[in-house]
Image: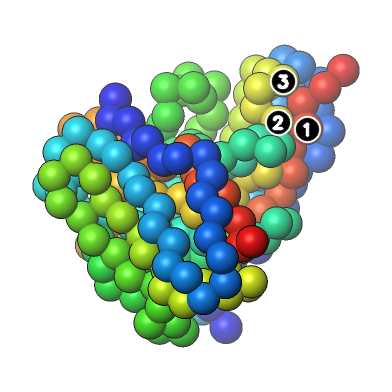
Amino acid sequence: EVQLVESGGGLVQPGGSLRLSCAASGFTVSSNYMSWVRQAPGKGLEWVSVIYSGGSTYYADSVKGRFTISRDNSKNTLYLQMNSLRAEDTAVYYCARDFTHGRYFDLWGRGTLVTVSS
Amino acid sequence: SYVLTQPPSVSVAPGKTARITCGGNNIGSKSVHWYQQKPGQAPVLVIYYDSDRPSGIPERFSGSNSGNTATLTISRVEAGDEADYYCQVWDSSSDHQVFGGGTKLTVL
């Protein structure tokens, strides 16, 4: 079955760090563009970051310099390392397959909740 | 950065047609994609490349895109269509994905 399963969310204090994981099955992460998208409570969708099949990475201005997207090809898993977390980073974080040729999200995980609070 | 503008809410009676707009500068030159999100669930792609439907999406869902406005049209609206809808484009100038603010569809 083709699916994405996120993990690693939780409660973290402001200024802290967290690493999210997204395990893929049924397809190869490294052959696809993969993105993270977040949704703050009661708010809309916000794109966070993408990693291309060639390894290039891009970030939303709101997280640039604090978040790092990466992947482990041997584990077929996508990651998001989040440092210097702020209250405004509180959100459900989704990983999504960013269809290479169309640049739309054709597969989503169920999301993992990150809460930044003291 | 590129901005997409959606109305916060749209209301429609069952069996009628709902139209949700997505405004952007010369959006007709871009490919627009639409997602449906129900409470507590992940988004689901309902329209891609302006007007194509993924398998499993009812024919009642259609899309168009021209000038400065893209439109998602839902015909013969059902109670189960009540959800938030988001438009999305890829901004090639910044290599960023962009979402509209979302529209809450209420079925009266």
B90 lies above or below B56: above
Q: Is residue A27 visible?
A: no
Q: In the image, what residue type sits under mark 3?
A: Ala
Q: Chain of mark 1?
A: A
Mark sitting earlier along the chain (1/3) = 3
- Considering every residue shown, the one lying at the far right of the view is A118
Residue wearing tag 2: A90
Q: Determine whether the residue tagged by mark 3 lies in a helix, strand or loop.
A: helix
Q: Earlier in the sequence, mark 1 or mark 2?
A: 2
As drawn, is B88 to the left or to the right of B84? left
Q: Please name the residue that numbered disc 1 is placed on.
A: A115
Residue marked by disc 3: A87
Are dots 1 and 2 in contact, CB under 8 Å? yes
Residue pictured at 49% horizontal, 22% vertical: A62
Q: Label 3 neighbourhood size at 10 Å, few (<14), some (14-19), many (20+)?
A: some
Q: Which numbered circle lies on residue B12?
A: none
Please tell me how crowded label 2 is: few (under 14), some (14-19), or many (20+) other residues with Cα within 10 Å: many
Residue A20, relative to residue A26: is it above or below? above
Whether residue B21 is visible here, answered yes or no, is yes
